[in-house]
Amino acid sequence: MERYREKMFAIAFAHLRNRTDAGEIAQDTFIRAHRALGRFRGDSSLATWLHRITVNLARNRCWYFFRRRRHRTLSPDCPLGKENDGTFAELIAADTPSPAQESVRAEFSDLVASCMERLDASHREILTLRNVLNRPYSEIAVAFNLNVGKVKSRIARARHHLRAQLIAVCPEFSAESENSDWFEPARAPGRSALTPA
């Protein structure tokens, strides 16, 4: 544990971006490894085996949080970070969306979540890392042991499958429609030189 604890913590923290959760995952890694030690065949090094356990536990935790919308439940008074005393509330624009816009966004988020659950695990996992947790391509490439080009290709394929699920449920999301057609803009667009009088 002394040899690998910090490394497992770093791996979990890279996935979760939360020190408490990362600490729990690192601890759970050693508990799982201890319980399964009799089944460890030695096909890989101990470090590789622990790494895989940590990654799997962290991914499961990410998906658990996503299904419960934890990523949308941070307090606006939560600090931006240890080095920054600012809060999320200070970043929020004063113009708030109308109740109708809020309702549409909530319905769309629920629809996407239900369609995500219909995807196969690999598509769901890579989309969660990229679109929900905003992980960079390079980090996802390390997690999946792929090059960045393959990661981008898999993400594009997963998005295609997600869109197909959305179209099956709501035909208005057909391939001919533009994403901007699905929502009203949050603010009324300003008059421009191209806008007819």
Image (spheres, rainbow, N blue to C red):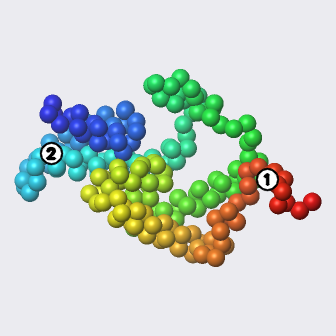
Whether residue 141 sits left or right of residue 5 in the image: it is right
Task: Look at the image and tell me whether residue 121 can be seen.
Answer: no
Residue position for label 2: 47
Seen at 17% across and 37% down, the residue is: 4
Seen at 30% across and 53% down, the residue is: 143
Identify the amino acid type marked 1: Pro
Coordinates of residue 52 in the picture (x, y in percent): 23, 51
Q: In the displayed image of the protein, which residue is found farthest to the right?
A: 197
**Secondary structure beneath disc 2?**
helix
Coordinates of residue 129 in the picture (x, y in percent): 41, 53
Residue position for label 1: 189
**CB-based contact (under 8 Å), mark 2 and mark 1:** no
In the rendered image, the vertical position of residue 141 relative to residue 165, given as above or below: above
**Secondary structure beneath disc 1?**
loop
Q: In the displayed image of the protein, which residue is found farthest to the front?
A: 193
Task: Look at the image and tell me whether residue 20 can be seen.
Answer: yes
Location of residue 127 by image quarter:
bottom left
In the rendered image, the vertical position of residue 73 relative to residue 67, given as above or below: above
Whether residue 107 sits left or right of residue 31 in the image: it is right
Image quarter (top left, top right, bottom left or bottom right) of the N terminus:
top left
Image quarter (top left, top right, bottom left or bottom right) of the C terminus:
bottom right
Identify the amino acid type marked 2: Ala
Seen at 55% across and 40% down, the residue is: 73
Upstream in sequence: badge 2 or badge 1: 2
